[in-house]
Image: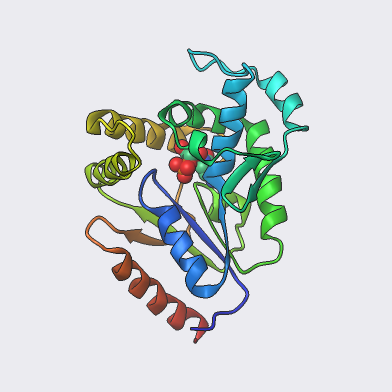
Amino acid sequence: MQIPDIIIAIDGYSSTGKSSFAKIIANEFSFLYLDSGALYRGVTLYAIENGYIDDANVIDVEGLDRALDDVDLHFGAEGAYIGDRCIEKEIRSMAVASKVSPIATVPEVRNFVDRKLREFGAKKRVVMDGRDIGTTVFPDAELKIFMTADPLVRAQRRAAEMKAKGENADIEAVLRNLQERDYIDSHREASPLSKADDAIVLDNSTMTMEDQMVWLKKIISERFGC
Ligand code: DC
């Protein structure tokens, strides 16, 4: 299937499989995949390691904002990097997961990430996943998908992923973490998670990845005549 030069924006709740879906789409259509959550996670790791967020999640916003000017956060061969250091493993830890939503409420952090995403997306043929791609980062994206799924199904999938990586996965804790993140992400003041008016909802609670690709290709062929 040959599709035109478009931006595909995928938003939705935590652990709905946005990034897995986006990666497969990127592979299928030779698009660039951009994981916006990885940038928020990268900023969070940086903030933890450099003392800009404490145990009570109090954030030194001014200090962090000043420091971000010199943080070389980018994507490379193995995922996200700060300078030469690949941070892919650290940013997926529970330590980062439990602090990323508070960090993502900070407008200065959102501006920093938005700037990077718009630079990366300028050439089109990108699929980007996050919480505010279709509403704020690329409001003119030609195709917007909003993903959701039953919370327990999401927690089970996430726990299975963590177990496969040899990490400790208490399903109750995983469920709590993703519900907390959904709440903070949807209720924050700066660019809260919400469905763009022109986004198409995908509830994948009972769908396989193959089902989702069939669903997507049908939409693409109807919308772009390919
Ligand atoms: O997609 P993820 O779980 O890796 O995202 C981690 C956190 O980053 C998520 O809890 C909220 C924040 N985020 C955001 O606020 N806006 C985005 N576009 C992407 C992620």
| Color scheme of the displayed model | rainbow
Residue 215 is situated, as x and y percent measured from the top left of the image, at: 34, 72
- Is 7 left, or right, of 147 in this rendering? right
Kindly identify the residue that appears in the image at 44 percent across and 65 percent down: 24
- 112 or 82: nearer the viewer: 82
Q: Nearer the viewer, residue 206 or 192?
A: 206
> Where in the figure is residue 131, as x and y percent of width and height?
49, 46
For the question of whether residue 105 can be seen, the reply is no
- Residue at the extreme bottom of the image, as rendered: 225
From the viewer's perspective, is 18 left or right of 77?
left
At 71% from the left and 38% from the top, the residue drawn is: 83
- Rendered position, 223 above or below 177: below
Q: Residue 170: where, in percent of width, then height?
A: 25, 30
Kindly identify the residue that appears in the image at 57 percent across and 50 percent down. Answer: 78
The image quadrant that residue 18 belongs to is: bottom left
Front position in the image: 201 or 38: 38
Task: Judge whether 183 appears above or below 124 on screen.
Answer: above
| Residue at position x 70%, y 66% in the image | 123
Which quarter of the figure has residue 74?
A: top right
Q: Position of residue 65 (x, y in %)?
A: 71, 27
Q: Is residue 48 above or below residue 2?
A: above
Q: In the rendered view, does 209 fall on the left or right side of 128?
A: left
Q: Can residue 142 be seen?
A: yes
Number of disc labels: 0
